């Protein structure tokens, strides 16, 4: 299947700093990418939908000024957690939608953020 | 998107078939049934999807009832590496976001 890569896979940062997570579709173009967050022992929660060349659509309760999403090209979307706090510590997962066919969704390996 | 209900957990013996049920009684005519799985600390992995006909690929088979209100994912010969959380999701497909429920935890025992 298609490959979606996230970087970094793990990151530890101090409270108050900002962290950028990259999501790349390696062998296909993705006009739409999705960002999820997963807390321990819980399911994935959709944060936002990222569309290439336009503003992201955020789910209810997700602060757009805190979680900045940029989808500048058809193969790259970035999530920046601004002024991170310990409660932002989580597993962040991106997914990219293939164009054509039935639009299968492929997921990255996830990025584990720990805010001290 | 329609909601799905799955048992919380199940187990099966290695080498045996694992049959994972899913109820989606409010599914709409244009919604597909998708199955994904998540092995601990990894991103979800696509398994299979279908609309109304049964589907089979190298990983699994998907059996959808005639009324489309329920489905079963079949792993024909479960291995220890199949231990994971399996998510059944209904969605209209292209350009539609997937909403994950709690999934079913499958434990494959030696």
Image (cartoon, grey):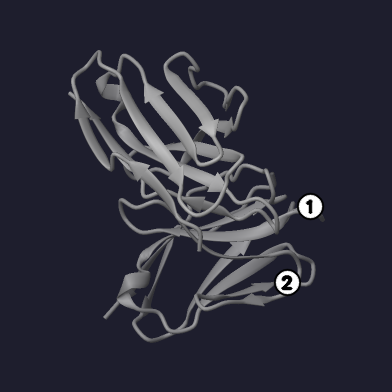
Judging by the rendered image, the residue that carries numbered circle 1 is B28
Residue A8: quadrant of the picture: top left
Left or right of A53, for residue A11 = left
Element carrying mark 1:
loop
* In the image, residue B75 above or below residue B88: below
Q: Residues within 10 Å of mark 1 (few under 14, many from 20)?
A: some
Q: Which mark is first along the chain, 1 or 2?
A: 1
Could you say where residue A36 lies in the image, as x and y percent from the top left?
Answer: 46, 37
Q: Which mark is residue B65?
A: 2
Write down the chain letter for disc 1: B
Q: Can the viewer see residue B7? A: no
Left or right of A92, for residue B98 = right
Element carrying mark 2:
loop
Q: Is the residue at mark 2 from the same chain as the one at mark 1?
A: yes
State the separation of the CA atoms marked 2 and 1.
Answer: 14 Å
Residue A113: quadrant of the picture: top left
Q: Residues within 10 Å of mark 2 (few under 14, many from 20)?
A: few
């Amino acid at each position: 299947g298609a490959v979606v890569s996230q970087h970094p896979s793990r990151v530890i940062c101090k409270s108050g700093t900002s962290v950028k997570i990259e999501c790349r579709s390696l062998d296909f173009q993705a006009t739409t990418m999705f960002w999820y967050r997963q807390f321990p022992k819980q399911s994935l929660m959709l944060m936002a939908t990222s569309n290439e060349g336009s503003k992201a659509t955020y789910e209810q309760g997700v602060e757009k000024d805190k979680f900045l999403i940029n989808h500048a090209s058809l193969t790259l979307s970035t999530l920046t957690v601004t002024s991170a706090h310990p409660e932002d510590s989580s597993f962040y997962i991106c997914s990219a939608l293939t164009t054509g066919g039935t639009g299968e969704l492929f997921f990255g390996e996830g990025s584990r953020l720990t805010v001290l | 998107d329609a909601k799905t209900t799955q048992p919380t957990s199940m187990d099966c013996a290695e080498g045996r078939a694992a049959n994972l049920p899913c109820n989606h009684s409010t599914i709409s005519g244009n919604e597909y049934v998708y199955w994904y799985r998540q092995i601990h600390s990894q991103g979800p992995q696509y398994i299979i999807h279908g609309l109304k006909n049964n589907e089979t690929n190298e990983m699994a088979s998907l059996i959808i009832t005639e009324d489309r209100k329920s489905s079963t994912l079949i792993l024909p010969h479960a291995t220890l590496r199949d231990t994971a959380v399996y998510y059944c999701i209904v969605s209209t497909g292209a350009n539609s976001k997937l909403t994950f429920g709690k999934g079913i935890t499958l434990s494959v025992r030696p």
